[in-house]
Amino acid sequence: MRYGVSGSGFGNHGSGGGLGDEWGARAARSRALAVLRVRGRALGAAVLPAAVAVVLYAGEVTGHFTGTGWTTARWIVTVLAVLVLLAAGAVALVVARARPAVTPTVELSETAAPDLHRLVRELADRLDVPAPSAIALTPDCDSWLEDRSHPAYGAAAVPAGTAPVLVIGSPFLWWMRVGELRAVLAPVVAGTGPASDPDIAAARRFVRGLDAAAAVPRDPGLGPLRGLGARGVGRVARLLLRACGSHPAEMERGVAVAGSERAQAVDHGARIVAQEQVGLAYAGWDRLLTRVALPAWRMGRWPARLDAGVVAALTELSRRDRLAEGFSSRLGDRPACDLLEEPGAVDEAASLLAARLFHGGPAEPGPDWAPVEWSRYPEEVVDRTWRADAARLHDVLDRLATAPVPGGPGDGAPEGPTLTRVLTHLTAAPGALDTGGIDSTTDTTGTLGTESTESTESTESTESTESTESTESTGGPEGPGPRDSAPPAGELPAVPLDLPAVPLEEDADDPYDDEDEARNPVADALAAALSAQVAREDAEREARLAATAGDRSGFTGPDGPWPLGPLLPPRTGRDLLADHVTALVCCAAVDTTGAVPGLDWLDGPALLVGGERAADLGPRVLALVEEGDPAPLRAWLSTTGVRPEKPVRLL
């Protein structure tokens, strides 16, 4: 259970009201007693029928309750008491044995980080609180105390009754200096004092058990009978959680106030500066994961030095942003990662865990899941990503069986993987290209679930009023007519047939209105086919990962066991098309000019032309994709010397 004493949350901001540590501890204890009273009432309700049965039997023995009516009442109450006690025993057993939420971390033994353990123990001595029983790292910008006395933690479990485990965000160790880390951890470590209170500890165990029991009905593999019992236990657990109300949250708030006030005596001035570093580290870590790490994960590579990369990203941020000026000057002080014996090995383990948490990668490296160093990132990730996207784009064009514009270059002959081919396709008139059965007016900006109509209906829909034809083209998963035959060989359906239809509501907020959708219907048709291809590849990747899944039990996420926290929502069809066209342009620039792939620590993969990042390429590609206007992109190609007619090297 994660306690409410967070390194980037309430615990590090102080109490805000000037109330002392004694008040915070008393408030937390009073809330804990309120939670325990709920447990007591539930226990009393469970034994009440048995107590009534005992009274009835005692009345019979003493001669007060005699007669047929009292005998019948005794039997009814006895049966009811037995049933209630059995149900209460089952609920209590499930609550006691239910597997709580287990936070995946990298364990730091004392031999792996003796200086860090010594710093934490000295901090606990100064605060006059018990020292944490262990230290672990998490690939996140947060720190907290976690009770790991439950057997579900396996080898990482600690004996019951011991102090909680201190979980530290791994980016803090690399970005923060030793003094700043001590100031950040002070209010967190101070939380071990209230955690040792018997009432608070009992209340936390009770709430944690209820929370785990409420999730038992969602466990896979339950039979009909066990599933019925699990649903009953889940209802009781949720009822008790509702009865607890806000007491658990207020209890954690009181613990945070107590820890924060106690930590005021430790490096109070440094805490203000350190808190600024927490926010900065969070911003840099988020950009590093979404812009730099995610493209590598999609290519089957995982950066092995993410925490070292956040230092480079934040240093770059301090160079660009005047608000961050002066932060990089701290880098001359001793970094907190010096408290580790082998920072590189710890960084690699945290980086692999980050890939599992945020992308759902395998637990162990392999041929299709290899680490990559930052020096090799442009070659192994950026260049490979561009060429894979370019190959996918041309493969989709081939499978669509697109025909060149009559009378245009290459008419009647198959075209190679050139940028000219894509420019010609995206700037052609809607009726000039055979889209292989894909309706050019199909909505690809938000969902992937609508089937396209026949190619003849596609042509009619671009010539007639859209109000009637758009209703037919999005009528349902089977289209306007029965689908009694598979599509011809070589044709690519707009979407996979097994994807459910998710039609947009009439009043839904669409990032593109009807006028925007009609600007470049050829691009929309290509985006639909490209989205289907990417969806199929993602499904194949997930199937491979599921076949080689390791120890995934106990972890739940929106897309199955892993990832727990996906970084970005799925890209729309137009976003995918823009990314693929940009990749093709970058490949052409690398193959025909002196441009090279590079890495921008804040923006991810970058094209370096003459040693400078080509930051003006994105808007020109969007003009081509969204409006069918090639003029800005052709001007950029002419200025940089890119030859679009030359074939590019594909992956």
Image (cartoon, rainbow, N blue to C red):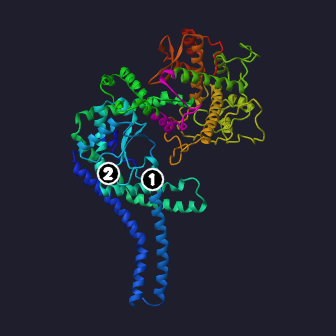
Whether residue 578 appears in this view of the structure is no
From the viewer's perspective, tell me whether residue 178 is left or right of residue 619: left
Q: Amino acid at mark 1?
A: Pro
Residue 201, position in %: x, y? Answer: 34, 55
SS category of the residue bearing label 2: helix
Please say whether residue 187 is one of the residues in the magenta stretch: no
Type of residue at label 2? Ala
Where is mark 2, residue-wise?
195
Report the mark closest to the observer, 2 or 1. Answer: 1
| Residue in view at x 59 percent, y 31 percent | 367
| Helix, strand or loop at mark 1 | helix
| Magenta residue span | 349-376
Answer few, some or many: residues within 10 Å of disc 1's Cα (few below 14, many 20 plus, some between 14 and 19). Answer: some
In this view, 233 is above or below 325 = below
| Farthest front residue in view | 111
Question: x, y percentage for residue 213?
Answer: 47, 57
